[in-house]
Image (cartoon, helix red, strand yellow):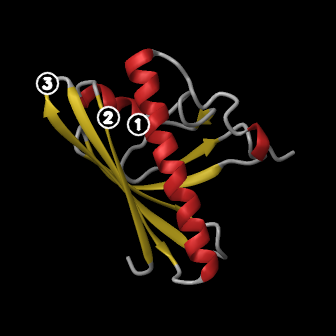
Amino acid sequence: MKGISTKVDLSILKPVAEVFAAFRNPVPFFTSETSGPLETGKEIVWKFVEFPKGFSVWVRKVVPNELIQYEWASGIGKGKNFVEVTFHPRDKSTTTVSVTESGWPDTKKGRERSYGNTAGWMHMLSSLKAFLEYGVNIRKGAFVHMKFE
């Protein structure tokens, strides 16, 4: 996909199957609600407490314990971004997750959105790590400053 691309990585001290399953159905550490797990060919709606409506996720490909690919709105006009999440087992109890998002236009607004989503993906991965490793939801209340009515 053309345009600006960003990537974040984080290692989680859990087996790949557990990390993959949590990402595939990201309630409560990322979303407040989902219309279903990420499955190839499905349109899933993710809801967040801060936003009044959900976000559609068009799932392009899911390979268990390896890969999730989807598209969602870029937030700029009618553009869509492509997200690829890969799961790399380091050993039986450690998984590195990589999230790459691409498709923002190479404009000032596109760069600003890409920076925001890069920070968002790192927060998502940190939330996933905290949830799986320690059983805590660090996302809860983290974005009250962004709540939209």
Q: Of 142 and 62, which appears nearest the observer? A: 142
Counting from the top left corner in percent of width and height, residue 30 is at 54, 36
- Using the numbered discs, state the Cα–Cα distance from disc 2 to disc 3 in whole angstroms: 14 Å
Counting from the top left corner in percent of width and height, residue 107 is at 58, 84
First-in-chain label (2 vs 3): 2
Q: Of 62 and 134, which appears nearest the observer? A: 134
Please tell me how many numbered marks the rendered image carries: 3
What secondary structure is found at the residue carrying circle 3?
loop
What secondary structure is found at the residue carrying circle 2?
helix
Mark 2, Cα crowd under 10 Å, few <14 / some 14-19 / many 20+, is many
What secondary structure is found at the residue carrying circle 1?
helix
In the picture of the structure, the residue carrying the numbered disc 1 is 23
> Is residue 35 toward the left or the right of residue 66 in the image?
right
Residue 43: tell me if it is visible. Answer: no
Amino acid of disc 3 = Lys
In the picture of the structure, the residue carrying the numbered disc 2 is 20
In the picture of the structure, the residue carrying the numbered disc 3 is 92
Q: Residue extending furthest right?
A: 149
